[in-house]
Amino acid sequence: MVGPQAWLAEAAQTMPPATAAPAAPPPWPDRQPPAQQPPAWQQPVPPQQPATRQQPTLVGGPWASQEEQLPRVTARRRTRPIGLSLAAVAAVAAVIAGGLVVSDRLSPASDERSAGEATTGGTGEQGDGASPSAGAPSGSSAPLQPVSVTATCQAPPGLDAAGNPVTYEPQLTLDAVGATAWRCPGAAVGQQLVYDFGAPVTVTSVALVPGYAKVDPADGTDRFLENRTVTAVAWQFDDGRTERQDIAAPSAGMAEFQLPEAVTTRRVVLEIAGTGNDSAVRDFTAISDVRFAGS
């Protein structure tokens, strides 16, 4: 045979013999009946598993490595530079210091005069408890210093409690030392001290310590109480003007006198117009210091 028939015949001869068909299943009685299930209300309830929180998927995907996952962004606390903080503290301190300086400058000046330097009007009355030689009169523009002084009388030298010699020249009224004084014997009313400034000056106020403001260092004796005191003086100027200063209660402090109006003069004459402490154990009139103020 030639053609497809020959090829089919040859293939049939080479095929293996057919196997027997499988046996049929046994009838129903030989089979095992299905297991009976209990009613639904008798079936045990399976335990419930706790719910697990689903992890969020990383931005880089589940296949991304730990290094590829985006880092967690945390908030940063802003810090101020130390330099700016120090500058702010310094500025506040400067403002406070400036306020204190301005407050100090604006506050009224304290009255540094002692009680004995206070006077009222043109009476020249003193207060009590003043310190000797308390400086230039208040209410004046500047202290004025004479170039020379002369006196119409002068007590002879004496001795202090330690035996040291003591003199009483009129120049001692210009040394600003209460323990030194010009002294004249007796009441000395009408006696004069003449002060020369060397050139015309404008005088606005005058002052004096109306007694011997000394406490003897050797035995503590108060020489102010042992000598006469000055209770009134007359101040004379080149233009002929005379101003009287009354000192009702003399003490060892400076008795100031404000002139009613400024006067221009080269010389000022201090004339004793009254004395006190007439029962003094030493019959001398003394003035420890004299001051002038003006321009």
Image (cartoon, helix red, strand yellow):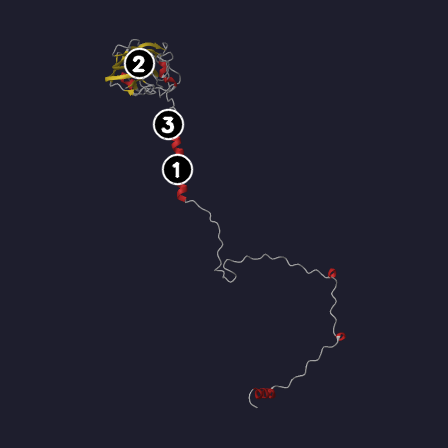
Specify the amino acid type for callout 3. Arg
In terms of sequence position, does the residue under pointer 1 or pointer 2 come before the other?
Answer: 1
**Quadrant location, the C terminus:** top left
Q: Residue at x 37, y 27 (%)?
A: 105
Q: Is residue 261 visible?
A: yes
Q: Residue at x 39, y 40 (%)?
A: 87
Specify the amino acid type for callout 2. Glu
Report which residue position mark 1 lands on.
Answer: 91
Report which residue position mark 3 lands on.
Answer: 105
Specify the amino acid type for callout 1. Ala
Classed neighbour count for the residue bearing mark 1: other residues with Cα under 10 Å, few (<14), some (14–19), many (≥20): few
Circles 1 and 2: CB atoms closer than 8 Å = no
Where's residue 189, x and y in %?
31, 9
Label 2 residue SS = strand
Label 1 residue SS = helix
The CA distance from mark 3 to mark 2 is: 30 Å
Q: Nearer the viewer, residue 26 or 293?
A: 26
User: Depth-wise, is mark 1 or mark 2 nearer the camera?
Assistant: 1
- Rendered position, 215 above or below 44: above
**Quadrant location, the N terminus:** bottom right
Classed neighbour count for the residue bearing mark 2: other residues with Cα under 10 Å, few (<14), some (14–19), many (≥20): few
Label 3 residue SS = helix
Where's residue 147, x and y in %?
24, 19
Report which residue position mark 2 lands on.
Answer: 261
